[in-house]
Amino acid sequence: MTVLSLLSLPLVALLLSFCSSTVVASSDYHENLLLHPLPQSALLASFNFRSNTSQESFDQQHFRYLPRALGQILQHAQTKELHLRFTTGRWDAESWGPRPWNGSKEGGTGVELWAWIDAPNDDEAFAKWITLTQSLSGLFCASLNFVDSTRTTRPVVSFEPFGDHSEVDQLHLLHGTLPGEVVCTENLTPFLKLLPCKGKAGISSLLDGHKLFDAAWQSMSVDIQPVCSPEGDCVVQIEQTVDMVLDIDRSKRSRSNPIPRPVPNDELVCDTSKPYHSGDTCYPLGKTNDKAWSLGQVFGRNLDGICPLADTEGSHEESVCLQVPHERGVYISQGAQEIKKDDGFTRCFKLAPSTPFDLSIPQQTVNVEVPLDEPVLHAERTIVGNGQERGGMRIIFSNPSNASAVDFIYFETLPWFLRPYIHTLRATITGRDGVSRELPASKIVKETYYRPAIDRERGTQLELSLSVPAASTVTLTYDFEKAILRYTEYPPDANRGFNVAPAVIRIVDNVHHAPIYIRSTSLLLQLPVPDFSMPYNVIILTSTVIALAFGTIFNILIRRVVSLDQASALGATTLKGRIVSKVVAIQDRFRGKATKVE
């Protein structure tokens, strides 16, 4: 189940201060780290790197903080705004609470990319899109070159540009996903190379591939967009974000001891309230968030000061922030200054240049927890049915609020070999009384945009505008048919199944007037798989028949059937026969001499 929660107001203010669009500043590069301990011994670490380049310098290819390799790709592909996501794992919102950045920095499982391209028509926009994906594939060592027409869609209302664009630009939005892409250190290395300090100094020095990809959930994002001030000054802003949820106990384990081992009996934390508790019987208590940890233990290295190019003046000098109750003790390295916020849970630290920084929290009793807000929407998406020919899709939306309804946009991309029947779309609503009643889909779905698939050319695009009443659960279902592929179109692991991209849900927050995004988990679709040994059997049998037939016909056409006398006469008259007879005569002469000598 996927859950979306609103961020708490202090956390929203903190994140918005990190990503505020400051055009005129003492430095054009800012970096921030937010640490938020979560229940079940988890730790959310949000890294944010942001830099600005003036629009004039960008047009003249005068790159300073914006990477030249990425800037030239955008100029060549006429890309005005770019959003790239690398995500692995699943966000457990029921245990961890609200998603970071309201889900705006998160992508679906695998790789997700969408961009606004300036082009006069759709065909030229798609040609530039292919250029963009192939260039980014080489830059980030990813399989983005496989984002072809079958994996590309054109969302209508699900995404809106975050940047300030000119009215003369003819923008085309294109969106592509690779749900089966495996994110690894090959993607992290080029990601770090785009930073000014390249992971050698500043908060980026904490990013280690062993820790990042050992996390329960992680997401890397790259956002490039134009930002203009009220005075008309425009910059090209690049923002890179890394969010990950680490298990504190797992991260603290030494790299020389990678295999987890059972906890010794004398170190077990048992629930003594159980009636069967005894010396040899223990009911273990759940993980708590009051355990001791430090930056060096969790990330395996210390923070090497701040990046020399980062802003050291103004509000952006608070590079590291921690969300724990103010009553909890926190120890920091010398030279760093601690600033506590008024919310009672946030404290930030000013780091000294070129000075290593470490943060340590001892184990202590926690009486106050950082509150987690109530979720806005629960969403679940599964494939139902059985058999190899047909199936169905079921999407469940639950609104936990007792006061207001939730309006959102549901965006779904289906591969071309999954053919949905939209006329079978049905809606079932369940109220707080637990009584379910089936309604026409038009009662729940306000608007529908459906773009059918074309075999081997494009996939299915479905966008629905829905509203879920307060304290209600809405279930949408529809049927689909599975296509039979050609045997050359199956991947090597065909029996595993085919990945279906996650659905995107866009909720408009009426309080902050900012869209909130959640993404469901990806699905695994089982298709009819032929017996791949049969083509090889046919090839072998055909080759054998051809060899026998060809050999027989060749012998009949080339060989001549003659008598023995004719063969001797032919052998004596031919050059080969004369040579062979001479050789035999010489051999007989030498044999005769050898016999006389004996």
Image: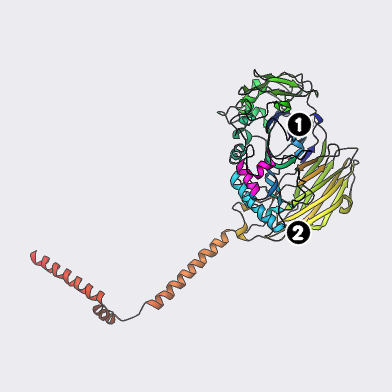
- Residue 17, numbered label: 1
- Residue 452, numbered label: 2
**Quarter of the rendering containing residue 26:** top right
Decide which of 522, 563 is in the foreground and name it: 522
Point 16% across, 70% down: residue: 586
Q: Amino acid at mark 2?
A: Pro
Q: For mark 2, does the 10 Å Cα neighbourhood hold few (<14), some (14 to 19), or many (20 or more) residues?
A: some
Residue 150, position as x, y percentages in the image: 68, 56
**Quarter of the rendering containing residue 216:** top right
Point 84% across, 49% down: residue: 465
What secondary structure is marked by label 2? loop
Residue 277, position as x, y percentages in the image: 73, 22
Instruction: State which tag comes first along the sequence, 1 or 2.
Output: 1
Point 81% across, 39% down: residue: 514
Range shown magenta: 48-75
Q: Quadrant of the C terminus?
A: bottom left
> With 380 as the anchor, is 113 left or right in this view?
left
- The nearer-to-camera label among 1 and 2 is 1
